[in-house]
Amino acid sequence: MTGGGDKAGASTGDGVETPTDDVTDDEAETPSDGETSGSDLPPAEEGWVRETVAYRGISRRLAAHYLRNLGGELIGTDDPAEATRVDGDGWRVALSAEKVTAAASITLTEVTAEFAGDPERLAELLPKYRQKAMRAGG
């Protein structure tokens, strides 16, 4: 968990966070079709911040379900398994999933959530999402 800084950060789900920047005027422009840009980042408004969070061991369906339960709406589909974007009040998330190698013959699904949102909204949302998405080893 990060301290009381002003910037959001990126987390790989293992406690490693790297700072991200405030959204610039160029990034704040939303594509005319409402879809995410080629970089898979959700569209952002001026003054919004971005944060990337990745967790292994959950599916994209489950991540979308969590975000929907936290007040988000699936964009472009009604099926959480197909969801690549979830929008809420003052925030947007682009979801992606890929298989990653955890050990020699063990592969896991890693879900990456690219958040963009009002800093205050993300400060409320991210701890709730992290609590739902975190998986303890056993």
Image (tube, rainbow, N blue to C red):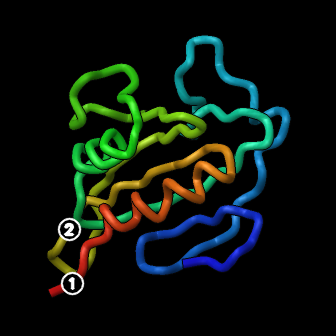
| Residue plotted at (53% across, 22% down) | 35
Q: Is residue 19 left or right of residue 87?
A: right
Front-lying residue, 97 or 126: 126
Q: Please, what is the three-letter code of the amino acid marked with disc 1?
A: Gly
Q: Residues within 10 Å of mark 2 (few under 14, many from 20)?
A: some
Q: Position of residue 59 (x, y in %)?
A: 23, 52
Q: Nearer the viewer, mark 2 or mark 1?
A: 1
| Residue plotted at (20% across, 68% down) | 107
Q: Is residue 16 left or right of residue 70?
A: right
| Residue plotted at (21% across, 37% down) | 81
Q: Is residue 122 left or right of residue 113?
A: right
What's the mark number on residue 107?
2
The residue sitting at the top extreme is 32
The quarter holding residue 72 reads top left
Label 2 to label 1: alpha-carbon separation:
15 Å
The residue sitting at the right extreme is 25
User: In the figure, 28 relative to 100: above or below?
Assistant: above
The residue sitting at the bottom extreme is 138
Disc 2 and disc 1 in contact, CB within 8 angstroms:
no
Residue that carries the numbered disc 1 in the rendered image: 137
